Amino acid sequence: MAAKFEILSPRAGEFRWVLSSQGRVLAESDAYTRKVSCVNALESFRKAAPTAVVIDTTTARVVKSPSPDTVTGKAARVTGRALGKVAATVKKVV
């Protein structure tokens, strides 16, 4: 099952987006007072996520994700299930 974004309105005049996969929440936004602001934030997140840099402060390494068209390999496994595919380049932080 693929990940999905949902736009929710838990209270009147409040909008949030939630990214979930297989019934698990992967990310969620802060509250927005306008739906268009919520949608803009969601789109910004979608565009930035495939190229976002992962900084592991426990090992002083930077893991940089490639562009989406060059993604290969298996992602980390959680409870025996592959979450997706990813390729990473590891660089040392100076």
Image (cartoon, rainbow, N blue to C red):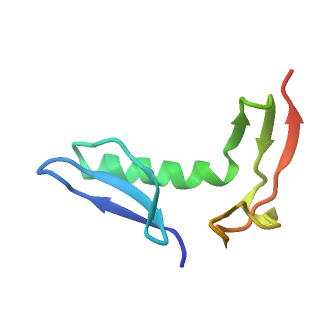
**Residue under the point 77% across and 65% down:** 69
Q: Extreme top residue here?
A: 94
Question: Quadrant where the C terminus lies?
Answer: top right
Q: Please state the total of marks drawn on the protein image.
A: 0
Residue at 67%, 45% in the rendered image? 52
Q: Is residue 46 left or right of residue 66?
A: left
Position in image of residue 79 (x %, y %): 62, 66
Q: Would you place residue 82 above or below residue 67 in this image?
A: below
**Residue at the far bottom in the pictured view:** 1
Nearest the viewer among 30 and 43 is 30
Residue placed at 27% from the left, 59% from the top? Answer: 8
Q: In this view of the protein, which residue sits in the foreground, 76 or 10?
A: 76
Q: Residue furthest front?
A: 79
Front residue of this view, candidates 16 and 44:
16
In which quadrant will I find the N terminus?
Answer: bottom right
Residue at the image position 78 percent from the left and 44 percent from the top: 64
From the viewer's perspective, is residue 39 above or below residue 94? below
Residue 67, horizontal then vertical, whole percent: 76, 56
* Residue 48 drawn at (x, y percent): 60, 48
Question: Front-most of 68 and 94?
Answer: 94
The x and y percentages for residue 92 are 88, 31
Residue 80 lies left or right of residue 22; in this view the side is: right
Q: Would residue 49 appear left or right of 6 to someone viewing this image?
A: right
